[in-house]
Image (cartoon, helix red, strand yellow):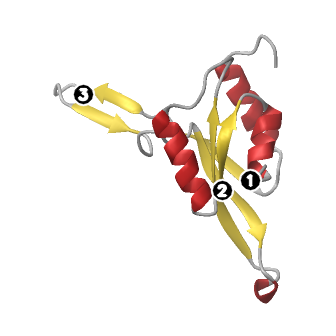
Amino acid sequence: GAGMSEADTQRAIQLAVGSLPDVRLFRNSVGLIQGADGRSHRFGLCVGSSVLIGWQSIVITPDMVGRRIARFVAVEVKHGRNRPTAEQANFIERVTEAGGAAGAAWSVADALRVLHGQ
């Protein structure tokens, strides 16, 4: 909402989604750190990967009634006028093309729309 930082929005999304029985999201910090040995080490899933990643358990097709599958979920939390970087937009597009649910969220409502494929 208004006056919320990106971190506040992310926490609100994690709290709201955490109450859903079929979704699990995890913080995915992505970056580069210099080790004590002076070498740089990348961390996180991959460059451009969303800040919240996880899965959504869904029931699928009639021939598999009652069986659950996990759909990959990626939510890129943004603040204000910020937009996903080219790498983040590419990650979202790849996940969506593969059948996952992915998108950017400026609010809890946006995150829920991502989970519902809207």
Numbered disc 3: secondary structure? loop
Q: Residue at x 67, y 65 (%)?
A: 70
Q: Residue at x 72, y 28 (%)?
A: 106
**Residue bearing the label numbered 3:** 35
Query: Is the residue under label 2 in contact with that under label 1 (CB below 8 Å)?
Result: yes
Q: Earlier in the sequence, mark 1 or mark 2?
A: 1
Tag 1: amino acid: Val
Residue 58 at x, y percent in the picture: 76, 66
Instruction: Compute the Cα span from label 2 to label 3.
Output: 32 Å
Task: Please give the residue where the numbered disc 2 appears in the rendered image.
Answer: 55
Q: Secondary structure at mark 1?
A: strand
Q: Is residue 115 above or below residue 13?
A: below
Residue 23: image tag: 1
- Residue at the image position 75 percent from the left and 50 percent from the top: 115
The amino acid type found where label 2 is placed reads Trp
Callout in the foreground (2, 3): 2
Local crowd size for mark 2, using a 10 Å CA cut-off: few (<14), some (14–19), many (≥20): some
Residue 103 or residue 5, whichever sits in front:
103
Query: Quadrant location of the N terminus?
Result: top right
* Amino acid type at mark 3: Gly
The answer to which quarter of the image holds residue 67 is bottom right
Asked whether, in this view, residue 42 is left or right of residue 19, the answer is left
Mark 2 residue element: strand
Whole-number angstrom distance, CA of label 1 to CA of label 2: 6 Å
Q: In this view of the protein, which residue sits in the foreground, 84 or 107?
A: 84
Query: Tag 1 or tag 3, which sits nearer the N-term?
Result: 1
